[in-house]
Amino acid sequence: MGGILTTIYNHSFHCSCISKWTDSSCPVYRYCQQQPEKSICSIFETSENLWMCIICGFVGCVRYKEGHAIMHWKETEHSYSLKMETQCDWDYIHNEYNELLTSQLDKQRMCIESRVQKYKEEVEKEISKAVQKIYENHMKNEEIWMSKILEVGEREKKVLRLKDEKIYKLETHVRM
């Protein structure tokens, strides 16, 4: 199996590497979404100088410590690792840093930031709509209450007028 395939997250991998994945999810996406607060070597349990296999997610220490990351490469032929500290990716086959994963992580970061911004804008629109609806309801309620207050005021005036008329009639009747 030769060539390069691109995942739905726009991350590119060698076909031979993808065929070795234990599940169908992109390891770059998996790492970005599920990165633990404090990673440790899967074998030695150290937290210094760690590398993560981007094919299966294995975390191993650097070759100059116990060398679990390079041992993993030799055993599995998973040829790319990510230096956890710097997010630089290493190509074991060519024995050099590879910018492919770094650029993919940058693309994913920008994509996630864009989605977050879009979500924030949608939430702000929804909040704005809700506030507008509350304001409109408040204004309708205010109109209703104002009309009720005016109604009550008119009834009060009418009652006072009738009372005054009765008093006047009684006073007139008493004077006669």
Image: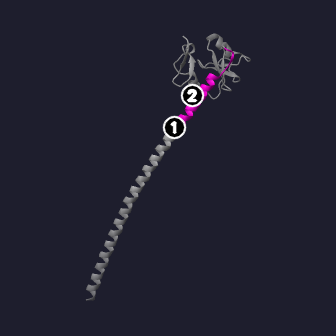
- Secondary element under disc 1, as helix, strand or loop, is helix
Which residue is label 2 attached to? 33
Residue that sits furthest to the bottom in the current view: 176
Which residue is label 1 attached to? 118
What separation in Å lies between label 1 and label 2 (alpha carbons)? 19 Å
The magenta span reads 94-117
Marks 1, 2: nearer the viewer:
1
Magenta: main secondary structure equals: helix
Residue 73 sits in which quadrant? top right
Judge whether 72 appears above or below 9 on screen.
Answer: above
Residue that sits furthest to the front in the current view: 3
Q: Residue at x 65, y 27 (%)?
A: 38
Left or right, 142 with respect to 28, comes to left
Q: Residue at x 29, y 84 (%)?
A: 171
Q: Nearer the viewer, residue 139 or 158?
A: 139
**Image location of residue 167, percent across then percent down:** 30, 80
